[in-house]
Image: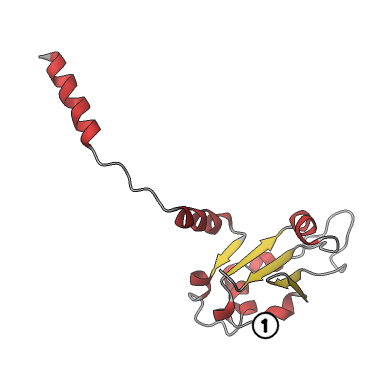
Amino acid sequence: MQLTGLALALLVVAAAPLPAQQPDTARRQSSRRASGNVVLAEDLTQVAAAHNLYEALQSLRPSWFWIHPTSRQSEFEGDIVVYLDETRLGGPETLREIPIKEARTVRFFRPSEAEARFGGGHLHGAIQVSTRP
């Protein structure tokens, strides 16, 4: 009798449906969204009052624009550098020239990440706007 109950319990567990697996793209997007360093196109469309990418990012990720000087720099040295795909545009004000609907993803790079990715001169980090999928 006891063996039958155990066998029945194992059968019930084995027959239970497995949780659905997320496709790789959905899993990557959800992990990027959770990181706080990436904003996706669908997130940008949720900011109805924004007229440009600068205003949308100020609403969604205001901390990206905060300057945090370290011991080797002052808050007056440089600025956050903005890239459109792989092209350097300038400072954060250039985001005002980019319509929200053109951005697919926007990523913030901390200073060390920005210097590793784009080279020197990124004392306050970088923001990269990707227009391609």
Residue at disc 1, secondary structure: helix
Kindly identify the residue that appears in the image at 58 percent across and 79 percent down: 102
Q: Nearer the viewer, residue 114 or 66?
A: 114
Residue 74: give x, y in percent of width and height: 87, 63
Query: Can you name the residue that lies furthest to the left here?
Result: 1
Asked if 83 appears above or below 110 in the picture, the reply is below
Kindly identify the residue that appears in the image at 73 percent across and 58 percent down: 110
Residue 108: give x, y in percent of width and height: 67, 63
Q: Quadrant of residue 114?
A: bottom right
Residue to which mark 1 is pinned? 96
**Color encoding of the figure:** secondary structure
Quadrant holding the N terminus: top left
Q: Is residue 118 left or right of residue 22?
A: right
Q: Quadrant of residue 63?
A: bottom right
Amino acid at the residue labelled 1: Arg
Kindly identify the residue that appears in the image at 17 percent across and 21 percent down: 7
Residue 30: give x, y in percent of width and height: 49, 56
How many marks do you count on the picture? 1
Q: Nearer the viewer, residue 87 or 115?
A: 87
Characterize the local packing of mark 1: few (<14), some (14-19) or many (20 or more) Cα atoms within 10 angstroms.
some
Asked if 31 appears above or below 62 in the picture, the reply is above
Asked if 56 appears above or below 2 in the picture, the reply is below
Q: Quadrant of residue 70?
A: bottom right
Q: Is residue 82 left or right of residue 18?
A: right
Kindly identify the residue that appears in the image at 53 percent across and 83 percent down: 49
Quadrant holding the C terminus: bottom right
Residue 50: give x, y in percent of width and height: 56, 82
